[in-house]
Amino acid sequence: MPIQPEALNKQISDLWVTLAQRPDGAHQGVVRSSSMTLITLVDKEQDSTGLSETLAGLMRTHPSRAIVIHVAQGKSEDLDAEVRAQCWLPTGQQKQLCSEQIEINASEKSLADLPSVLLPLVVPDLPVVLWCRSERSTQLPVFNELIALASRVIFDIADFEDPLSALKRIEGTSNSGFAVTDLNWTRLTRWRDMVAQVFENFACRADLPRFRRITINYFANPVSPVPVAAILMAGWLVKCLGWTGLGRSRREGGKRILEFDDGASLIYQIVGPGGAGSRLASLTIAAPSDPAIEVKLARAQDRYLDVRVNAAGKPPVENRGSFPPSDDVSVLGEELSIRRRDEVFAYSLPSAIRIASHWA
């Protein structure tokens, strides 16, 4: 059944009248709050309860008109929608803050009709952000039209069955000039910051050309064998170190070893299960030649990131940093605070895709 945007907008207006009406007929304090339109694409079979909790948590810091599109398999022409509100009472306040949430159910076939439905529903003069958790939608021609509605595009591909294709899609979106990123990259922020701090030291920075081996240990993802977070981290490091000409990939015991034309090597190893998003366990960057240097970062108790620098003939240098919250509300909230294009992510992406191709 076709969705009529005019009818949905009327439902939204009626919703606000209802929210402001008390049972005794008097009006109660309700404040309509919105800083953007957040369009979320999610595959139908994914956890809708967890998504609703994430959106409710986001509304406190990033109030928005949330449009959630549940994409189902099949060639049916089903397309329906409902409107509801997300409300909360700020501490010490007497007025509720509320934002609209529009839930749309669409099949792969009916998704082609969505751009014309969505356009009248976005809040005028405010940013439009597309958050894509749907692998199904990225494989459809209409996806480019959905991207065109947004000023910022955020992917979350950790649990995609084919992350390589998704990374290529992200690269194409980035090359088209969109401000685009992936939440797995955001979750690596502390790791990248700590590595950067190490190489701010003049002695380590002077030895950069001698670092020829990277070892990444990660927790296996039960959904996808391709470790997205580990690959994005390696893409950034390889680009920064100037390694070129990724050659062959080989297996040695439980390790996957990628060799570069200039003699450098990248080593991956699974250290255990339970790694939603292929979380990193540890990262080692080494200069094996004399005098040897090793920089190691390791996850500690899922709360800290420990850094240790070992240089031949010198006492080790150690540091510890705290991990920021890694739940979807915190990570997505961090990304929603950024309006500009992430040039470092765009810079690292081609290298990450080259590495990911060895898992294909």
Image: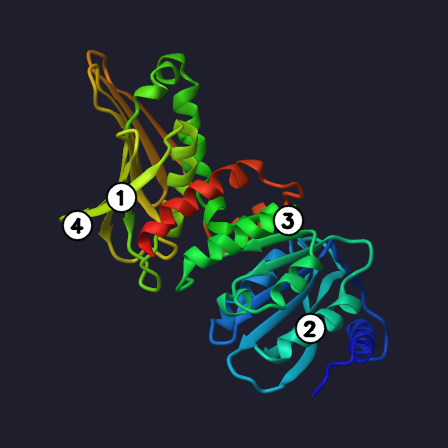
- Judging by the rendered image, the residue that carries numbered circle 3 is 176
- Judging by the rendered image, the residue that carries numbered circle 1 is 248
Which quadrant: the C terminus?
bottom left
Numbered disc in front, either 4 or 1: 1
Q: Look at the numbered discs 2 and 3 and tell me whether their residues touch, using CB distance below 8 Å.
A: no
Numbered disc in front, either 1 or 2: 1
**Residue most toward the right?**
26
Q: Amino acid at mark 1?
A: Arg
Q: Is residue 307 left or right of residue 145?
A: left
Q: Amino acid at mark 2?
A: Leu
Q: Look at the numbered discs 4 and 1 and tell me whether their residues touch, using CB distance below 8 Å.
A: no
Picture quarter containing residue 56?
bottom right
The x, y position of residue 63, in whole percent, is 69, 56
Q: Residue at x 43, y 34 (%)?
A: 192
For the residues labelled 3 and 1, the Cα–Cα distance comes to: 31 Å
Residue 300 visible, this angle: no
- Judging by the rendered image, the residue that carries numbered circle 4 is 254
Q: Residue at x 76, y 60 (%)?
A: 95
Numbered disc in front, either 3 or 1: 1
- Dot 4: element: loop
Numbered disc in front, either 3 or 4: 3
The x, y position of residue 259, in whole percent, is 26, 38
Picture quarter containing residue 25?
bottom right
* Vertical position of residue 27 compared to residue 94: above or below: below
- Judging by the rendered image, the residue that carries numbered circle 2 is 114
**Residue most toward the left?**
253
For the residues labelled 3 and 4, the Cα–Cα distance comes to: 39 Å
In this view, the residue in front, 244 or 77, is 244
Q: Is residue 350 left or right of residue 64?
A: left
The x, y position of residue 351, in whole percent, is 43, 41
Q: Residue at x 45, y 58 (%)?
A: 165
